[in-house]
Image: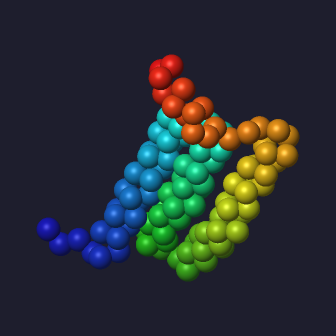
Amino acid sequence: MDWPIAAVLTWFFIVAGSLFLLVGGIGILRLPDFYSRIHPAGITDTMGAWLLLVGLMFASDTWLVTVKLMMLLLFLAVTSPLSGHALAKAAYMRGLKPMLGRDLVQEAEDD
């Protein structure tokens, strides 16, 4: 089997990005409170999307497409951490308290 290295890298990054997105989506559904759900949302937004974009960069035929994907990657690098922080701060300022210690144990017993 004679695969070009670009095709192998394309598939590797796309599959790895898809796995990160899947795990992050499961984490959003499984974690108990808002603050702990921000973390997998950030993972899917950064690492999953980054890996997919890098895979698409290897698959692109022209430099113009690659540059556009790099610009999108840089945009995600700036906005994703800021949006997670802004969400957490806004929730805290509105009075949403994080689950700590006994709250987590009590919820686990209720399930």
Q: Is residue 94 above or below residue 109?
A: below
Visible in this render: residue 32?
Answer: no
Q: Position of residue 52 (x, y in %)?
A: 48, 61
Visible in this render: residue 57?
Answer: yes
Q: Position of residue 84 (x, y in %)?
A: 69, 54
User: Relative to 91, is 104 on the left or the right?
Assistant: left
Q: Who is closer to the viewer here, 53 or 6?
A: 53
User: Relative to 62, is 94 on the left or the right?
Assistant: right
User: Relative to 25, is 81 on the left or the right?
Assistant: right
Q: Position of residue 5 (x, y in %)?
A: 29, 76
Q: Is residue 15 above or below residue 96?
A: below
User: Relative to 93, is 99 on the left or the right?
Assistant: left
Taking the view exactly as shown, the residue that stands out farthest to the top is 110
Residue at image coords 73%, 61%? 82
Residue at image coords 79%, 45%? 92
Residue at image coords 43%, 72%? 58
Taking the view exactly as shown, the residue that stands out farthest to the right is 94
Residue at image coords 57%, 33%? 102
Task: Tell me how many marks there are.
Answer: 0
Q: Position of residue 6 (x, y in %)?
A: 35, 74
Quadrant where the N terminus sits is bottom left
